Image (tube, grey):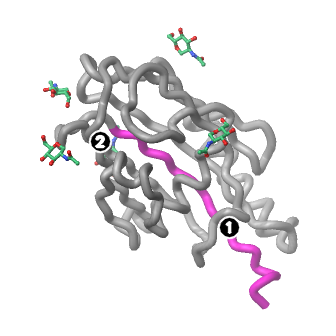
Amino acid sequence: MRCQLMICAVLGLFLTFHIKINDAVVFKFTNFVCESYNQSWFVFHNYRLKAVSRNKVLLNMNSTVLHPVNNASVHVRIFKRANGYKPWLVDNYFDVCQYLRKPNHPIANIIYGLFKDFSNLNHSCPYVGPQIVKDFYLRPELLRLPFPTGDYLLALQWYFDKKPLADTNVSFTFVEDLMKRN
Ligand SMILES: *[C@@H]1O[C@H](CO)[C@@H](O)[C@H](O)[C@H]1NC(C)=O
Ligand SMILES: *[C@@H]1O[C@H](CO)[C@@H](O)[C@H](O)[C@H]1NC(C)=O
Ligand SMILES: *[C@@H]1O[C@H](CO)[C@@H](O)[C@H](O)[C@H]1NC(C)=O
Ligand SMILES: *[C@@H]1O[C@H](CO)[C@@H](O)[C@H](O)[C@H]1NC(C)=O
Ligand SMILES: *[C@@H]1O[C@H](CO)[C@@H](O)[C@H](O)[C@H]1NC(C)=O
């Protein structure tokens, strides 16, 4: 699965550069890894990517919060690939419950805006029960950031009561619309 997606991503990049240079940007998932560090509070049933076309990859995740949570935070980091992943611009902690009461941070707004329509996580605290992301794909028109072409990793480390709970790490490819820039 992972290798297949990598090959698709590489092939996608190649074709993009050589054939579709004046088409819309490419913005798609290439890998997705999750891990719970506290199975008595949070379990992943499954998490996977599914390529439905060359430039569209769906992300699905099914997980359960086993006890109500009113105190959650997330460490958001973005890495850009260049001989391994190097930290890139974003390294922030967010209080999830506070943010959801009043969504007002530009970086969090972009990330939340990309997935909130595909998930049942888009409500205020507490969180309990099934936490589902369904057929989530990346929409470049919602990315109001000057992203350079490259491969990225968005690492989200979740905490309940300041204790490490889980990682959800998503890798993605972004290819600029080179014609648009000229
Ligand atoms: C997620 O990414 C971070 C940053 O690279 C890393 O420290 C962590 O081990 C990763 N987690 C998983 C489950 O791969
Ligand atoms: C999520 O996984 C649980 C446990 O396997 C299952 O009962 C439930 O139907 C799944 N939900 C979705 C939306 O796939
Ligand atoms: C949450 O997502 C659903 C679709 O799953 C959507 O209908 C609803 O408007 C979203 N709510 C918010 C607050 O974004
Ligand atoms: C799991 O998370 C809960 C809620 O934050 C905490 O009370 C408990 O100590 C955690 N367990 C472990 C093993 O970290
Ligand atoms: C969340 O829990 C941590 C650890 O118990 C505490 O230090 C922090 O003040 C709590 N935050 C909120 C908003 O209640």
Residue 4 falls inside the magenta stretch: no
Secondary element under disc 1, as helix, strand or loop, is strand
Residue 175 numbered tag: 1
Q: In this view, does 167 lie to the left or right of 162?
A: right
Q: Is mark 2 on a helix, strand or loop?
A: strand
| Category of crowding for the residue at label 1, using alpha-carbon neighbours closer than 10 angstroms: few (below 14), some (14–19), many (at least 20) | many
**Which residue is found at the position 45% from the left and 54% from the top?**
154
The span picked out in magenta is: 167-182
Query: Which quarter shows the C terminus?
Result: bottom right
Q: What residue type is labelled 1?
A: Val
Ligand 5 neighbours mark 2 (CB distance < 8 Å):
no
Which one is nearer the viewer's eye here, 50 or 82? Answer: 50
Residue drawn where x is 78% and y is 37% of the image: 52
**Residue 75 visible, this angle:** yes
Which residue is disc 2 drawn over? 72
Q: Which residue is farthest bottom?
A: 182
N-terminal label among 2 and 1: 2
Q: Is residue 122 above or below residue 46?
A: below
